[in-house]
Amino acid sequence: MTPPFQQRFVARAAERSPLCVGIDPAAESLTGWGLADDIPGLRAFCERMVEACAPLVAVVKPQAAFFERHGPAGMEVLRQTVEIAQSRGALVIIDAKRGDISTTAAAYADAFLGPRSPFGGDAMTLSAYLGLGSLAPFFEVAQRDGAGVFVVVRSSNPEGSVLQQARLPDGSSVAEHLADQVTARNRAEAPSGLGLIGAVLGATQGSEAAALADRLPNSLLLVPGIGAQGATMDDVRAIFGRHYARIIPSVSRGIARAGPAVADLKRAVERLIAEARGA
């Protein structure tokens, strides 16, 4: 039986580092490396990123959209990227931000989550716009197969603020309400320790993200926004303070821009690992 994702992450983070490296093969990233925006270019970019990063970090996070835009052949590269990263000892979060209801949600989970799925993700990101309860099929598959899920609670993009900061009749924001729901569900299933459901909190949200972390005491926290979006490891440490041991700091373009040489990519990762450890 596969141990729960949260346990596997804690072990990897202790052995290596808690860092998550995003693999975002956007057209500009491929051309910036001198690669064509096609399947061979996509494959070369991903193979180089995995070679440099996967042996050093706990997690890699391929963004599914950049593979989907290349059609079926691109999705095969996604499958291969997951497989190769896992063979190098990294966990893989497929960043798909899926969210739907009933059998459709279950189908998305069957596609992306766990060793039985075609894409084999150790975890995936989810959107709760249809309500946290609509994500129950994802949670069931994750529980069954030892996979992880990360629900977007407070995103790093400025466009999310109007909706996520909107106030409900009880005075709580949408993000606060969602955080409380995640915590209640985790507590019901795992009264102590880390629960099944992780949360995405943008590192660019400062004190708001810190307050949300307080409301999510039993969740792993996937924290994007470091590097190209402006946040630093020092910011993450300052914002999340006592929650730092539960943080998965995520960097994508900030690593890729160091390429295309594998040695340069490795040095960029090693610098961020040192920063994450406070060295």
Image: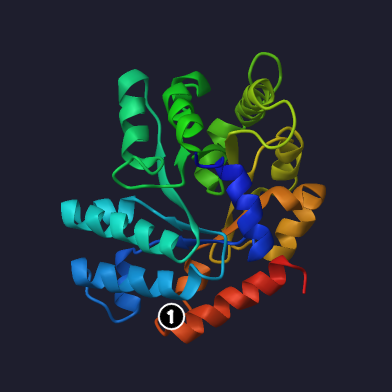
Q: Residue at x 66, y 38 (%)?
A: 219
Q: Nearer the viewer, residue 196 or 105?
A: 196
Mark 1 lies on residue? 259
| 183 up-or-down from 212: above or below | above
Residue type at the position of mark 1? Gly
The residue sitting at the front extreme is: 1
Q: Residue at x 74, y 67 (%)?
A: 277
User: Could you tell me if residue 27 is visible in this image?
Assistant: yes
Q: Is residue 255 left or right of residue 121?
A: right
Q: Residue at x 50, y 43 (%)?
A: 159
How are the residues colored?
rainbow
Res 30 quadrant in image:
bottom left
Q: How many marks?
A: 1
Q: Position of residue 108 (x, y in %)?
A: 33, 33
| 130 up-or-down from 262: above or below | above
Q: Residues within 10 Å of mark 1 (few under 14, many from 20)?
A: many
Q: Is residue 243 left or right of residue 59?
A: right
Q: Position of residue 237 (x, y in %)?
A: 76, 58
Identify the element where label 1 is drawn: loop
Q: Position of residue 37 (x, y in %)?
A: 22, 69
